[in-house]
Image (tube, rainbow, N blue to C red):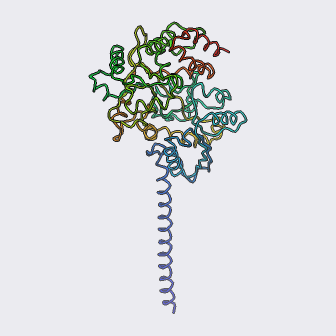
């Protein structure tokens, strides 16, 4: 019996050891699996690259990040922005994004300013960077890029230095990380130029020749509504006459070069460059004249390109320097007027701070910028032409690449009331009813109030 008991006891011990070994193996496998799953998450940063510095999901506190952008409503990038948010919350499952993006109209701007005034600002906001942001900037609730980079050296690492500089606020401080910018340029129906053996208007001589020939052929040389949207011509004529440095100053009295630029409105009108009803048509009709080949040229912004039907025979060129102008060829009106900010409210909470930084980086890395840009305007990061760009899209890209300077338009420097007065006076300038000096002094006096 004793031997039988010893044998049975030994068998039981072996079975117990086997079960213990199996249990330890299962525990080890489960631990490795959990570790592997966690490291898979750990290894992906906002750029989609391996990053061992990102902490484990289980070690992060849940964060609700409040965000606002201008990519709302019918904005062409609304869907792209929502796609970035979805991917971001998948990559960072401990972060919940509560977004309230809307179209950036005047009502929206008023509401944003009111929210900042009463302490209801979001954690991250994409907002204006120029004079349009003055009300919000006055609240002093944004963290500067230098402060963020001191803690996160890779912050905005894909953004071009020139783009960060262009997105600096009017006080020269860099707070916003931009995604895209814009340019203004001279759209030309190249097929009309080819039909009449004309060179594109890259010199003033070519411009004059084109105006004379097109007028003789009953083709409107330049589509523009001086009554409605003469803005682009105002900007380029003053830039061409004064050069970028003088053009971007805000003087107290009318500069002679600004007057020379605006005087060109009468010269062009007297040459028959504009539609005969330029004082009464609106900008939409002027655009239709160009799109339907009834007009040869139109000065407009990069956003105009996507609405042009003929993407094959339309090109963008520099407006030539006017006679006696101080600007260099290639001087361009354009810029960056918006970017992503992080508020002090988000920065002061360490969990929200990190989430805000990752969110901005997810929206401003090279891949996101390329998506937002889409071949339209300027990209704030180094991007390559997409394979599906049209000839007009490529022409716009080449045009902006050739720019020797880029200056923001006048409405980014003077008050809205002053700018409205300037625009309202262009018809009188073109007819000679009012002298450019008289109008500009009136504008600058309003701005100085």
The answer to which quarter of the image holds residue 223 is top left
Residue at 40 percent across and 33 percent down: it is 291
Residue at the left extreme of this rendering: 197
Report whether 218 appears left or right of 254. left
Is residue 444 positioned above or below 368 on the image? Answer: above
Left or right of 438, for residue 42: left
- For the point 45% across and 16% down, which residue is it? 269
* Marker count (numbered): 0
Say above or below: 170 vs 251. Answer: below
Q: Position of residue 259 (x, y in %)?
A: 51, 9
Q: Position of residue 70 (x, y in %)?
A: 56, 38
Evaluate whether residue 242 shows in this view. no
Q: Is residue 63 above or below residue 225?
A: below
Image coords of residue 26 (percent x, y): 48, 68
Instruction: Give left or right: position of 363 versus 137.
Output: left
Q: Nearer the viewer, residue 72 or 438?
A: 438
- Whether residue 173 is visible to the viewer of this picture, yes or no, is yes
User: Which of these two is toward me, 356 or 180?
Assistant: 180
Q: Residue at x 52, y 16 (%)?
A: 248
Q: Determine which quarter of the picture holds residue 395.
A: top left
Image coords of residue 369 (percent x, y) = 45, 38
Q: Which residue occupies the extreme right position in the image?
A: 118
In this image, 301 relative to 112: left or right?
left
Above or below, 31 relative to 390: below
The quadrant of the picture occupied by the C terminus is top right
Which residue is more in the foreground, 408 or 62? Answer: 408
In the foreground, 65 or 111? 111
């Amino acid at each position: 019996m004793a031997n039988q008991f010893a044998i049975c006891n030994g068998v039981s011990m072996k079975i117990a050891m086997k079960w213990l070994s199996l249990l330890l193996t299962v525990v080890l496998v489960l631990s490795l699996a959990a570790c592997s799953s966690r490291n898979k998450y750990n290894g992906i940063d906002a750029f989609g690259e391996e990053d061992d510095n990102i902490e484990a999901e289980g070690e992060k506190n849940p964060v609700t990040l409040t965000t606002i952008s201008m990519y709302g409503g019918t904005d062409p990038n609304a869907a792209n922005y929502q796609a970035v948010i979805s991917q971001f919350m998948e990559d960072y499952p401990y972060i919940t994004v509560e977004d309230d993006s809307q179209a950036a109209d005047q009502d929206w701007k008023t509401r944003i300013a009111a929210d900042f005034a009463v302490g209801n600002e979001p954690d991250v906001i994409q907002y204006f960077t120029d004079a349009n942001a003055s009300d919000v900037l006055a609240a002093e609730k944004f963290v500067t890029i230098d402060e963020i980079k001191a803690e996160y050296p890779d912050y905005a690492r894909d953004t071009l230095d020139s783009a960060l500089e262009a997105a600096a606020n009017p006080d020269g401080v860099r707070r916003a990380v931009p995604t895209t910018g814009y340019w203004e340029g001279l759209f030309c129906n190249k097929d009309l130029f080819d039909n009449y053996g004309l060179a594109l208007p890259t010199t003033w001589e070519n411009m004059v020749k084109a105006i004379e020939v097109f007028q003789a052929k009953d083709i409107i040389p330049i589509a523009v509504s001086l009554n409605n949207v003469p803005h682009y011509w105002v900007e380029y004529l003053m830039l061409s006459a004064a050069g970028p440095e003088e053009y971007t100053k805000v003087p107290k009295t009318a500069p002679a070069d600004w007057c020379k630029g605006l005087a060109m409105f009468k010269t062009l009108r007297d040459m028959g460059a504009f539609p005969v009803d330029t004082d009464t048509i609106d900008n939409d009709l002027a655009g239709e004249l160009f799109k339907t080949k009834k007009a040869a040229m139109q000065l407009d912004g990069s956003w105009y390109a996507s609405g042009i039907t003929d993407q094959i025979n339309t090109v963008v060129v520099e407006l030539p320097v006017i006679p006696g102008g101080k600007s260099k060829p290639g001087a361009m009106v354009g810029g960056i007027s918006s970017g992503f900010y992080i508020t002090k409210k988000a920065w002061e909470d360490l969990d929200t701070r990190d989430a805000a930084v990752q969110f901005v980086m997810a929206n401003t890395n090279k891949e996101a910028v390329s998506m937002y840009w889409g071949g339209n305007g300027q990209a704030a990061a180094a991007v390559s032409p997409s394979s599906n760009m049209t000839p007009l899209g490529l022409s716009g890209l080449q045009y902006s690449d050739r720019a020797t300077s880029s200056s923001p338009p006048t409405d980014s420097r003077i008050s809205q009331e002053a700018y409205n007065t300037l625009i309202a006076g262009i018809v009188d300038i073109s007819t000679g009813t009012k002298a450019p000096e008289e109008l500009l002094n009136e504008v600058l006096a309003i701005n100085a109030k």
